């Protein structure tokens, strides 16, 4: 279908670095109390790769199943092929991953379904935040604690567009990551490679904003 060179860039390392080095999650030294969640079978390989990058042997991996019952209604269950079940999971930190969000119905219902675990923290990580006005309104639901996304959509950094979600939204700016990858593809020399080529954008309304300043300084040192 497409002619020419096309490359699929997936910033696994960026997600993993932020999840490991920020205070967005709470878990033990080997991942005790941490749950990575795929919303469906299609996301399994992506979430598994994140799991490997984190290197936390005692973290859990669960997979959900969704059945669309109407245009904007889905039923969420635990997938029969899920690597782990809910047994023994109490007050975990849960990260639900997806590639894109539009109406928000699936993610909110998934978070509501996961509330039976009484999670200490519930984070939704999405690559492309393409949410409608209806979707942003829906994702203000308290079952969804924090939203971690990339700035692949230009409007994501606009506080007015974020609306009430600014209190729970964290954007990882990946311009440097894209530039570095493009230089590798085109074999263009670079002055220096940054190990963690991303920046953090967070509203002062976010409860973690003050502590984020310390993390930004630490990130510079790690780079």
Image (cartoon, grey):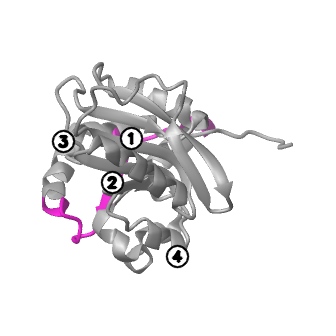
Q: Secondary structure at mark 3?
A: helix
CA–CA distance in space, label 2 to label 3: 13 Å
Report the front residue among 60 and 115.
Answer: 115
Give the x, y percent position of residue 41: 59, 33
Q: Secondary structure at mark 4?
A: helix
> What residue is drawn where x is 37% and y is 65%?
141
Residue 187 on the magenta span: yes
The N terminus appears in which quarter of the rendering? top right
In magenta, the rendered stretch is 184-210
CA–CA distance in space, label 1 to label 3: 16 Å
Q: Which of the two discs, 2 and 3, sits closer to the camera?
A: 2
Residue at numbered disc 3? 221
Which of the two discs, 2 and 3, labels the residue nearer the N terminus? 2
Residue at numbered disc 1? 14
The C terminus appears in which quarter of the rendering? top left
Based on the displayed image, in which of its 4 quarters is residue 69 positioned? Answer: bottom right
Residue at numbered disc 4? 133
Establish if 29 lies above or below 188.
Answer: above
Q: Which of the two discs, 2 and 4, sits closer to the camera?
A: 4
Residue at numbered disc 2? 199
């Amino acid at each position: 279908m497409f002619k020419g060179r096309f490359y699929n860039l997936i910033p696994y390392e960026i997600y993993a670095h932020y999840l490991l080095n920020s205070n967005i999650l709470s878990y033990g030294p080997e991942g005790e109390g941490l749950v990575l969640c795929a919303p469906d079978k299609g996301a399994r390989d992506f979430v598994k790769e994140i799991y490997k990058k984190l290197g936390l042997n005692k973290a859990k991996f669960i997979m959900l199943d969704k059945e669309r019952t109407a245009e904007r209604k889905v039923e969420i269950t635990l997938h029969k092929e899920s690597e782990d079940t809910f047994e023994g999971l109490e007050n975990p930190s849960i990260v639900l991953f997806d590639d894109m969000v539009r109406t928000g119905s699936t993610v909110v219902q998934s978070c509501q379904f996961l509330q039976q675990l009484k999670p200490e923290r519930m984070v939704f990580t999405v690559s492309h935040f393409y949410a409608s006005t209806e979707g942003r309104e829906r994702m203000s639901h308290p079952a969804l604690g924090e939203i971690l996304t990339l700035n692949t959509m230009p409007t994501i950094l606009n506080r007015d567009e974020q609306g009430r979600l600014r209190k729970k939204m964290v954007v990882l700016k990946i311009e440097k990551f894209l530039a570095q990858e493009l230089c590798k593809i085109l074999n263009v020399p670079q002055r220096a490679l940054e190990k963690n080529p991303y920046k953090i954008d967070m509203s002062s309304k976010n409860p973690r904003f003050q502590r984020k300043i310390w993390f930004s300084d630490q990130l510079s040192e790690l780079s």
